[in-house]
Amino acid sequence: MMEPQDKRSGYVFNIQQFSVHDGPGIRTTVFLKGCPLRCNWCSNPESQERNPELAYNLSKCIGIAACGRCLQVCPNNALQAGADSKPVVVRAACRKCFRCAGVCPSTALSVFGQRMSVEAILAVVEQDQAFFSRSEGGLTISGGEPLMQPDFTIALLQEAKRRRINTAMETSGYAEWPALEQASKYLNTLIYDIKCLGSDRHREQTQLANDIILENFVKVTEAFPSLSILVRTPVIPGFNDSEEDIAAITNFIKQRPNISYELLPYHRLGQQKYEYLGRNYPLGNISLTKEQLERLNTVKTVYDNPLKS
């Protein structure tokens, strides 16, 4: 059951310091849980559900004979003996009390996500202030989709700006416009994903159409013409890796002010986390070659206006 959320705390699954790929300069990236999309290539499957989730890394488990504590503390019999003398997680029976993770000595069982306050997050972010000032970096809020926790995201951005921290947010654009509008008031940089222009194909790969995403992009560029926006397209083999796909996105965004555009190569770095969550990775063993990405990079328009800090 989803817990009620106050405006100054929310669910975070990672804070990554010294990031150089999530906006200008050296940044501290805060990853929030919750996302409306279910992209088949998602590299952060632990971000999709808003509430904390149980992760199980079988390779770290020392076995029932040597431990077995998780079986003893689970009140719902969601951990059972497996054929290899290691516990098996029965996901349907798990009620996410996380007692098992609390007693696991090898951290084979752990929790993706914790509730944190605005103040606690910024205490971590401000540890890197010296690096921000030297590199013109700052705080980036990512996910998941930050606007799945709109009040918390806006409160975090608002307080960061009050403390004179440079701010960026990465979004899928699938959000209610008032939330995106309010968040944008406190941003130096907006990182906006546009995966393809075709609504049906977008739904096939993410489970949702992209009408709201494209409408919000137009709205945010019109409402905030001076806001630096980086549009990103994850290039997925068999989905949007044609020259026509990239040209269509380029033509869609090139009339807007302060836009930079970047192609992100497909990778499988998050595949193992699906196993930790008891899920199957949707895309199998597809791959994108360096030559394919170089060919697509020649298609997209090269913009002269770099991101502003």
Image (tube, helix red, strand yellow):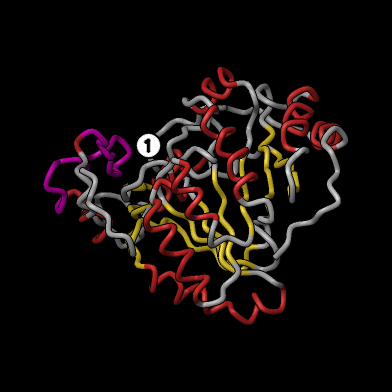
Question: Residue sitting at 69 percent across and 34 percent down?
Answer: 235
Task: Answer with the quarter of the image where residue 244 lies.
Answer: top right
Question: Residue sitting at 44 percent across and 40 percent down?
Answer: 176
Side of 179 relative to 287 (left or right): left
Question: Residue sitting at 66 percent across and 55 percent down?
Answer: 227
Q: Nearer the viewer, residue 236 or 244?
A: 244
- How far across and down, in percent of the image, does residue 267 sit? 65, 39
Task: Answer with the quarter of the image where residue 94 lies.
Answer: top left
Q: Residue furthest left?
A: 75
* Amino acid type assigned to the residue bearing label 1 in the image: Gly
Vertical comparison of 198 with 104: above or below: above
Q: Secondary structure at mark 1?
A: loop
Q: What is the quadrant of the N terminus in the image?
A: top left
Side of 300 relative to 70 (left or right): right
Q: Nearer the viewer, residue 75 or 204?
A: 204
The residue tagged 1 is: 278
- How far across and down, in percent of the image, does residue 88 sit? 28, 39
Q: Residue furthest front?
A: 223
Quick check: is 80 in the magenta stretch? yes
Question: Residue sitting at 86 percent across and 43 percent down?
Answer: 302
Q: What is the quadrant of the C terminus in the image?
A: bottom right
Quick check: is 71 in the magenta stretch? no
The boundaries of the magenta stretch are 72-92
